[in-house]
Amino acid sequence: MPAKHVSARRKNLHILAGIVAEGTVITDTRKQKFFVEREFARGGFGRIYSAHQINGHKYSKKESLVIKVEPCANGPLFTEITVFQRILKMEMLQEWIQKKKLDHLGLPPFISSGIFEHNKESLRFLIMPKYGESLESFRKRSGGKLEKKLALKIAIQCANCLSYMQEQNYVHSDIKADNILCGSSKNFANCVLVDFGLAKMAKNNIDKPDKKKAHNGTLLFTSIDAHRGCDPSFRADLEILLYNLMYWITGSLPWTDSLHSSDEVLFNVFFF
C-alpha cells in the first residue's frame, strides 16, 4: 500500500478563498481578459480553476489555462507569484533552453497575476498553462511504482529544472510526485515541476539550524538540512529529488513507517 504523504508545514491562520463562479471574467493590469471555468482542485488554502484567455490566441482554447486563487491576506500564493515574476518569464526559460541546447525544460511560464474583487472579497490570482495529471496519480494507477527507465527520465528533467533555478539563485524545497505534472495529455515523456509555495532565494548556505524551522516540507522527502531547521539549499533540493527517485522505483523508503514522528524520521534518514 502506498505510503501516506505527511506535510510538516506549520499551522497558520490562512483562510480558504470564496468560490469564484464559472463564467467570471478576470482582467489583469495589461487588459488581458481570462474566462473562469470549473474548479477542479484545491491547493492548500487556494482554489484552482480551469480557464482560457478571451482576447488572446495562444490560450484561447477551453481549459488551456489554470487560475490559482487565494485571499489577499494569505501568503503562499504571494510567494509563488513572486517566483513566477522573477524567474519564470517565458523569454528567460526559452533563453536557457537554447543556451543548454535542450528540447524541453519542465517549468511553467508566467502568464499573468494580479488582484480582483469578487463578492466583496479581495482575491489574488496567478495564471499559468494547464498540464496533465500528476505523477502521483500516475504512480498510484501503476501499482505504486514506476519503471526504472521512466523514473530516471523524470528525475533528469527535474534536475534540469533545479539547475535552472539554481542559476537564478532559487531553491524549490518541495519536490514530490504531487508537484510534477504530465507535460502532455498522453505520457510523462515531458513533465513539468510546479508549486513554488516553499521556493526561496538561496542564502549563503550558512549551516545555522533553527528549531522553529525544523521539518519544513513534505515529511517523507524532507532533507537532513530541513529536518535540522537550516535554510533551504541547492544540496537539499538534490537530496529531496534522490529520495523521490528511490520512492518512485521501490514504492517505499526506509522511514516510511516512521511518519508519525518527525524526529524518528530524522533519526532514520540520518543513519540511512
Image: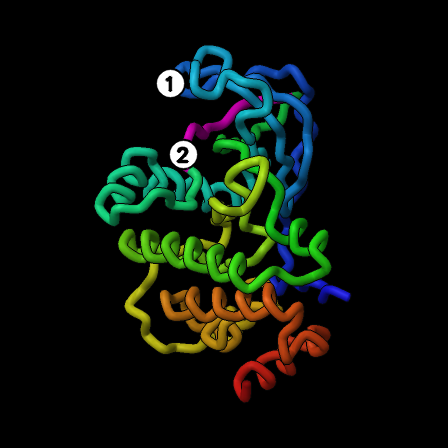
Residue 112 within the magenta-colored segment of the rendering:
yes
Q: Residue 211's x, y, as percent?
A: 52, 76
Q: Residue furthest left?
A: 99
Q: Is residue 58 left or right of residue 182?
A: left
Image quarter for residue 22? top right
Other residues around mark 1 within 10 Å, as few (<14) / some (14–19) / many (≥20):
few
Q: Residue 74's x, y, as percent?
A: 56, 43
Q: Secondary structure at mark 2?
A: loop
Residue 256 seen in render: yes
Q: Residue 84's x, y, as percent?
A: 40, 40
Q: Which comes before the other along the chain, label 1 or label 2? A: 1
Residue pointed to by mark 1: 30
Residue pointed to by mark 2: 110
x 66%, y 55%: residue? 139
Q: Are marks 1 and 2 in contact (CB under 8 Å)?
A: no
Q: Is residue 257 left or right of residue 85?
A: right
Which disc number belongs to residue 160?
none
Please name the amino acid that badge 1 sits on. Answer: Arg
Q: Is residue 84 above or below residue 145?
A: above
Q: CA distance from mark 1 to mark 2?
A: 14 Å
**Residue in the foreground of this view, choosing between 259 and 248:** 248
Please name the amino acid that badge 2 sits on. Answer: Phe
Q: Is residue 255 above or below residue 193?
A: below
Magenta part of the chain: 109-118
Q: Quadrant of the N terminus?
A: bottom right
x 68%, y 74%: residue? 256
Q: Secondary structure at mark 1?
A: loop
